[in-house]
Amino acid sequence: MEDNIDKAVSIIHSIKKWMSFIVLILMMIIVIIAIVELGIILIGFELVETVEMYFKENVIHAEVVLLVAVIAVSRKVILLDLEKYDPIATIGLALIIIALGGCYYLIKKSYRGKNG
């Protein structure tokens, strides 16, 4: 009788471990989906802001365009599967990130020079 109880407890513990594992995987899937959706929403907000600024001032602000590009590239990096891409493509993406960061820095620096 005790052997049956021990066997049942062992089975319940293993089921509990698997259920915890399945819940963890489902939670990770939900978080990944939320990140993807958030990225799309952020890019949309930045694009709307760019169009709004264009209609108000009839000028396209390079800072806003660069921010949209940074958000798009950040989304790409978050979803990047390194096994799927060649190392050259990954290096190219790294160079794009460095170039966008450098451009954004120079634009911010030029704005500080004009204002201060």
Image (cartoon, rainbow, N blue to C red):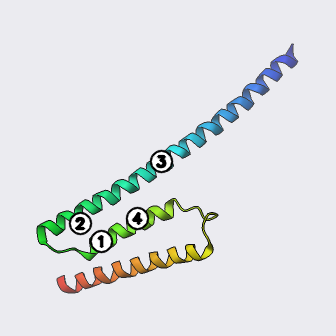
Q: Where residue 109 appears, x then y in whole percent? A: 29, 83
Q: Does 33 appear above or below 52?
A: above
Q: How many marks?
A: 4
- Residue that badge 4 annotates: 72
Q: Where residue 63 appears, x then y in whole percent? A: 28, 74
Query: Which residue shows up at 65% across the image and 33% down it?
Result: 19
- Residue 89, quarter of the rendered image: bottom right
Q: Where residue 62 appears, x then y in whole percent? A: 27, 76
Q: CA distance from mark 4 to mark 3?
A: 16 Å
Q: Earlier in the sequence, mark 4 or mark 1?
A: 1
- Residue 69, quarter of the rendered image: bottom left
Q: Quadrant of the C terminus?
A: bottom left
Query: Which residue shows up at 45% across the image and 61% down it?
Result: 75
Residue type highlighted by circle 3:
Ile
Q: Are there few (<14), some (14-19), or many (20+) residues within 10 Å of tag 1? A: some
> Observer-nearest residue: 24 or 49?
49
- Residue that badge 3 annotates: 33
Dots 1, 2 in contact, CB < 8 A: yes
